[in-house]
Amino acid sequence: MPRPSIYDVAALAGVSAATVSRSLGGKSKVAPETRQRVLDAAQLLSYVASPQASGLASGRTRAIGVVVPFVTRWFFSELISGVTDVLRDSGYDVVLYHLGSARDRDSFFSRMPLARRVDGVLTCSMPLTDEHTLALRALDLPYVSIGSPMPGRASVGIDEVAAVGAAVNHLVHLGHTRIGYLAGEPDDADFGFISAPQRRRGFELAVAAAGLEVDPRLQASGRYGTRGGASAMASLLAGPVLPTAVVAEYDELALGALLTLRRAGLDVPGDLSVVGVDDHEMAEVVDLSTVGQDVHEQGVTGARLLLQQLDGAPAGDGGAAEAVHVLATRLVLRGSTAPPAGWRTR
Amino acid sequence: MPRPSIYDVAALAGVSAATVSRSLGGKSKVAPETRQRVLDAAQLLSYVASPQASGLASGRTRAIGVVVPFVTRWFFSELISGVTDVLRDSGYDVVLYHLGSARDRDSFFSRMPLARRVDGVLTCSMPLTDEHTLALRALDLPYVSIGSPMPGRASVGIDEVAAVGAAVNHLVHLGHTRIGYLAGEPDDADFGFISAPQRRRGFELAVAAAGLEVDPRLQASGRYGTRGGASAMASLLAGPVLPTAVVAEYDELALGALLTLRRAGLDVPGDLSVVGVDDHEMAEVVDLSTVGQDVHEQGVTGARLLLQQLDGAPAGDGGAAEAVHVLATRLVLRGSTAPPAGWRTR
DNA sequence: CCCGGACCTGGAAGCGGTTGCGCTCTCAAG
DNA sequence: CTTGAGAGCGCAACCGCTTCCAGGTCCGGG
């Protein structure tokens, strides 16, 4: 028994297919009594309209393309979770495009499978080349970028520069003067976090603003993740000049750093303070001070912005389509930061 | 300028729409020279066939529904990553359904938005009621279940009982006799890991098999995640009888347990051994012994099984459609386990 | 009593492809 | 030279729904 079509429902309800469509779609006027009859019939047959056909006829797909470079990393999974929750509740399907490598991205943006498949696009902290951006623009679909502003398009994110600045200032206020920086490096998939440059800049600006010197000997980098943080910290420890505190580009690096320090027998924050950025779920576990961002909320906001564009401005006019939403970050003080050794409050 | 249709391509190439379709679809015979002309024309117009229309006409959507209860948890994100990689390379789109709460699931399975949207379905460790299962069956689509076998359908997973058993045996061989168990509890979303009962059973069977007593005073549970592990361990420490080793239902719990132990000033593995299950990425960082499973590989395998059904047996015959793939687990020995205090090798 | 308008509903034309069927043309065998 | 097999390609019929347009009813007002 094949799936029932709209005609089956129409026949059962004793109306035309047009009326069934109207009753279910809820758009134009149908006599309440008629509508109920149709609804009952549909229910009875457990009829579900073919998204294919309805999309073809109406020009709307009721699906959103969500493009992410990674799905296994904390930041992205939080984002996806926020996005999918909002979209599901609005009746949109989420088509997930997982583009880890540059190769994947290139082939994706040149083939553009998004073309007629979705009503809108959401990219999450995607490192896009000009070509990619162009291809995206050519789609001329409602679009929101999360994690990286895009000229003329709506976006949501945090102030990366300020976030790292807050971390630095916290250390400065504690009295630290030799502040190190742990950065991530692009990994095999040739992808560094898109926010990396800004975070580094945030670090340097804040250090300079505090009247301190930006000392390259106090900076180190490691591959993505905890492992990278561990090795970066190790190289800092092996360096010519020791910091009294370090800020990590993101929490995973800080976690690794903590590990290295513990193994080296150094006390945190006694011998060295550590502060991260993100407020990763593990940060609380290891008592890491950090600058938190609400990633789930960014996903939610991004999705909402997109929905707004979808049933409002038809992509491209002023209004919400260009809004840049900057979400707040918060300094989360935990046990990994303290005044430098030998320093005392006046 | 609206998106080009197949007729635009046809006109440009000087052929009929049918030929364009055949040239791009690659199915039936087209003269190589003609096909090339069509390909060039399509390329020139950057033509992408509407999935809607082609799906409607052909009955295939080139999309797979992936249903997960969570996306932010290690296990699931790894799975999704494996699944999406395979499907993307096979030209399938992934429609992600993120159903965290029982309410979400109920409304999902009763509305069944999957109906005509996808060619196949993949569920990942979903706790399904009989109703859900029935609704899924009624779809009559190629289907693979990851993380929980389903009668008559293909599935992939690990032997949960054996995995925990391996953890227990490891401790037994080390000489432990008072072995505790840390379990997770369902969280707000009313969801406990679907494998929880089997893991517990694995624990109890292995303990019994070792000739030891299953002592309820050596078992504790906490809410999902590290936090839960920490509190579960705490309650064990506060209990009437102390274990010399504990196995945690999954690594996140073990991580929390390690934290509690460290804070309590207990040495691991000196005072107490800890072993987890999963080989979570943080396990390596904190030097946790564990029983590892390759979750990414499970995703890959699941996706492959589904593809096999898609272009082979039309859902429901014998063959691969019912295969139960059990992937291997491996005992990963790290620094969190050792013989019990006061014990020495003969 | 007649007419205009509001309100429902049905008919039918697509939406943009796919594909069965059949026509045309080429070429080798009879 | 005739005939038949194939290969290539076009015609047209859908796929299942949405939506424009027009027709039919029912009312209230003139």
Image: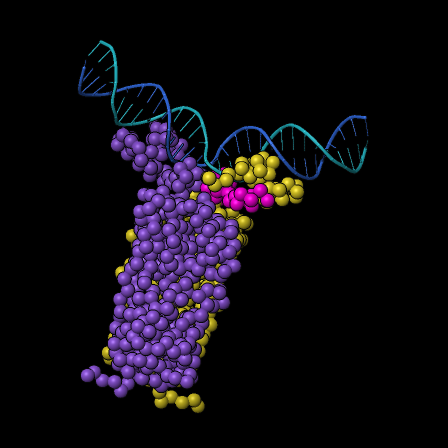
Chain colours: A yellow, B purple, C blue, D cyan
Residue A259, x across and y down, in percent: 31, 77
> In which quadrant is the C terminus of chain B drawn?
bottom left
Q: Which image quadrant for residue A285? A: bottom left
Q: Which residues are magenta?
A: A40-60
- Along the line of sight, which residue is nearer the eye, B207 or B268? B207
Q: Residue at x 44, y 70 (%)?
A: B185
Q: Residue at x 48, y 44 (%)?
A: A51
Residue B42, x across and y down, in percent: 34, 37
Left or right: where does residue B295 sit relative to residue A305?
Answer: left
Residue B22, x across and y down, in percent: 33, 33
Where A161 sits versus B180, above or below?
A: above
- Along the line of sight, which residue is nearer the eye, A273 or C15? C15
Left or right: where does residue A220 sit relative to residue A58?
Answer: left
> In which quadrant is the N terminus of chain B drawn?
top left
Q: Is residue A163 magenta?
A: no
Where D18 sits versus B86, above or below?
A: above
Q: Residue at x 22, y 84 (%)?
A: B344
> How many numbered marks, from 0 up?
0
Q: Residue at x 49, y 61 (%)?
A: B101
Q: Can I make out residue A62 in this image?
A: yes
Residue A82, x across and y down, in percent: 47, 60
Magenta: main secondary structure equals helix
- Along the line of sight, which residue is nearer the eye, A244 or A211? A244
Q: Can I make out residue A204 in this image?
A: no
Q: Is residue A54 magenta?
A: yes
